[in-house]
Image (tube, rainbow, N blue to C red):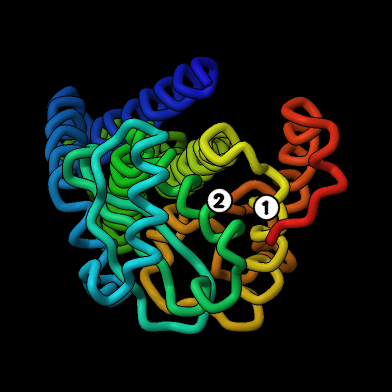
Amino acid sequence: MIGNQIRTAALLGLLSGILVLAGYYLVGNEQGLILGLIFAAFSSFGSWYYSDRMALASYAAQPVERSEAPELFDMIKRLCDRAEIPMPKLFVVPTQSPNAFATGRDPDHAAVAVTQGIVELLSPAELECVLAHELTHVKNRDTLTQAVAGTIAGGITFLGRILTFGALYGPVSRDTRRGGNPLGLLFLIVLAPLSAGLIQMAISRTREFAADQGSAEITQNPLALASALEKLERIGHEIPMNGNPALSPLLIVNPLSTKGLQSLFRTHPPTEERIRRLTELAQQLQPSMLNAQPT
C-alpha cells in the first residue's frame, strides 16, 4: 500500500512538471515557468474543492435519504465502521448501466454514487464489496488524486491546442529563439498531452488495484468482488454509461469501449488481471474461499 502511494505521488509530481515545462515552451521564456506553476496551483485547488460537484453533476446523480434505501444505508454504515471513516453522502445515478464511483475532497466531504443498474444486478455480497472498494478510495483520498491528475492532464492538452493554433496561424512567442524551437513545438503539441494522458491512466490503474485490495481487507471476501467485476465488465459494455469521459477513471469499471487502439489507453487495469489478483488474495486469506460462492 505504501509503495502504491509513493508511486502515485511520483506520477503526480511528473505530471505537474510536464505542465510547468509546457508553460515554458508556450511562452518561450522563464515567465512561462511561473505561469505553469500558477496554473498547476489553481487547477489543483479547483479540483480539490469542486471535484465532487463536477462528478455528481456529470452523471446526473441524485441524493438519496435513508428512508428511501434503508438496506443500502445500513450496508454502507457497517462498512464505514470497519474502515473507520465517516459516513459519506449517498447518491443514485438514474441509469441501467451498472457502475459506481466515489468523489469528494476528503473523507469528511465524501460522496458515494451507485447506479440503479448495479443495485439491481449484483447480489448483496457483491454490492457490499463494490461499496467497500469505493470507500477505500475515500479513505485513501484517491478521489482527490484522480481529480487533480485529470485537471492537470486536461490543462496540458489545452496548452497544446493553443500552441497548435498559434503554430498554424501565427507566432506563439515573441522570443523567436525559443518560440520557434521545433523540439519545443513537438513536445507541447504531441508529446506533452500524450505523456500526460498516459501518466493519468497509470495513476488510475495503480489506485484501482489498491482499492480492490482495500475492499478485500474490509469485507474478507475478495471472490465476491471478483464476481462483481466480471458482471460489471460484461453488462457495462452492453449498456454504456453516459457522462464526461474525463471522469471515467472515477468509476469502478471503465464504461467506454476498450476495443482496438483504445485498449492502449485504458483508465482501468484489465478486469482479468484484477480478478486474478483477487483470486490470489483469496488464497492468502483463506484457501477454502476458492470453493465458496457469493450469495
127 displayed left or right of 105: right
Whether residue 8 appears in this view of the structure is yes
Tell me residue 102's x, y (percent). Answer: 36, 53
Q: Residue 55 vs residue 200: left or right?
A: left
Residue at (50, 43) in percent of width and height: 204
Q: Residue at x 33, y 35 (%)?
A: 141
Q: Judge whether residue 185 can be spotted in this image.
A: no
Q: Residue at x 29, y 71 (%)?
A: 58
Circle 1 Cα neighbour tier, 10 Å, few/some/many (<14 / 14–19 / ≥20)? many
* Snapshot quadrant of residue 250: bottom left
Per the rendering, the mark at residue 236 is none
The amino acid on which the numbered mark 2 sits, given as a three-letter code, is Cys
Snapshot quadrant of residue 209: top right
Image coordinates of residue 295 in percent, x first then y, are 68, 61
In the figure, 246 relative to 38: above or below? below
Between 273 and 39, the one lying in front of the other is 273
Going 21% across and 42% down the picture, which residue do you hit? 105
Residue 23 picture location, percent across and down: 24, 36
Q: How many marks?
A: 2
Kindly indicate whether the residue at mark 2 contacts the one at mark 1 (C-beta within 8 angstroms).
yes
Q: Which residue is mark 1?
A: 224
| Rendered view: 189 above or below 283 | below
Mark nearer the N terminus (1 vs 2): 2
Q: Position of residue 238 (x, y in %)?
A: 65, 82
Please tell me whether mark 2 sits on a helix, a strand or a loop: helix
Q: Is residue 96 above or below residue 91?
A: below
Check disc 2 and report the residue beneath it.
129
Between 288 and 214, the one lying in front of the other is: 288
Q: Name the foreground residue: 229 vs 203.
A: 229
Q: Which amino acid, mark 1?
A: Ala
Q: Is residue 131 above or below residue 280?
A: below
The one nearer the camera, 240 or 93, is: 93
